[in-house]
Image (tube, rainbow, N blue to C red):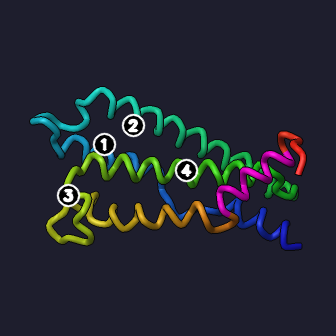
Amino acid sequence: MAKALLAHERSSTGEHVDLGRLLTNIKHLARRYERDGRPVLEDESFRQRLARLEMDADGLRYTRYRLLTALMQGRAPGPEASIFKLYQSELCQALYDLALESMGPDAARWYDDTLSAEAYDLPMQMTITRAMSIYSGSNEIQRNIIAKRVLGLPD
């Protein structure tokens, strides 16, 4: 019963995170903030990481659809719930890290009313994403589940 409950919990982990909105905010911030006298978005390395994370977010969205479809069809979530939870928590952390990188020193300003609406709560939200790698079974536990149930590795 506990394993089934945790699998269902993992299936809904991070539903509060709107990755599309976060990506839009990152792009806006990267246009607004500058590094070496140029908008951060003009940095090729930054753009490549942003593009990779945007593709990862799209893949995660479709994975969520597959997982929710299985649940709506009455199938219990299997080890794919662990893969989903692990991937989502690490993707969210990477996105928030990139957002704060685009802000430069302003990333240290928590709940500062002088920050733009897009930047206002990013520093605090980034710290919350660290908890995502712990709740619903830590990422280390998820890797063990994946190793045993997906890859068939021994205990």
Asked if the residue under mark 3 is in contact with the one under mark 4, i.e. CB atoms within 8 Å, the reply is: no
Amino acid carrying mark 2 in the image: Leu
**Which tag is nearer the camera, tag 3 or tag 2?**
3
Secondary structure category for the residue under label 1: helix
Q: Where is residue 7 drawn, in percent x and y?
A: 78, 62
Location of mark 1 (residue): 27
For the residues labelled 2 and 4, the Cα–Cα distance comes to: 15 Å
Asked if the residue under mark 2 is in contact with the one under mark 3, i.e. CB atoms within 8 Å, the reply is: no
Q: Residue at x 89, y 42 (%)?
A: 152
10 Å neighbourhood of mark 4: few (<14), some, or many (≥20)? some
Mark 1 vs 4, N-terminal side: 1
For the residues labelled 4 and 3, the Cα–Cα distance comes to: 23 Å
**Which tag is nearer the camera, tag 3 or tag 1?**
3
Asked if the residue under mark 4 is in contact with the one under mark 2, i.e. CB atoms within 8 Å, the reply is: no
Location of mark 4 (residue): 90
Quarter of the image with the N terminus is bottom right
For the residues labelled 3 and 2, the Cα–Cα distance comes to: 19 Å
Could you tell whether 134 is left or right of 92 in the image? Answer: right
**Prevailing secondary structure of the magenta residues:** helix
Q: Where is residue 27 drawn, in percent x and y?
A: 31, 42
Which one is nearer the viewer's eye here, 140 or 1? 140
Mark 3 vs 2, N-terminal side: 2
Q: Residue at x 72, y 55 (%)?
A: 142
Q: Which residues are magenta?
A: 138-149
Residue 68 visible in rendering = no
10 Å neighbourhood of mark 2: few (<14), some, or many (≥20)? many
Mark 4 vs 3, N-terminal side: 4
Q: Where is residue 82 drawn, in percent x and y?
A: 73, 53
Which one is nearer the viewer's eye here, 132 or 59? 132
**Which tag is nearer the camera, tag 2 or tag 1?**
2
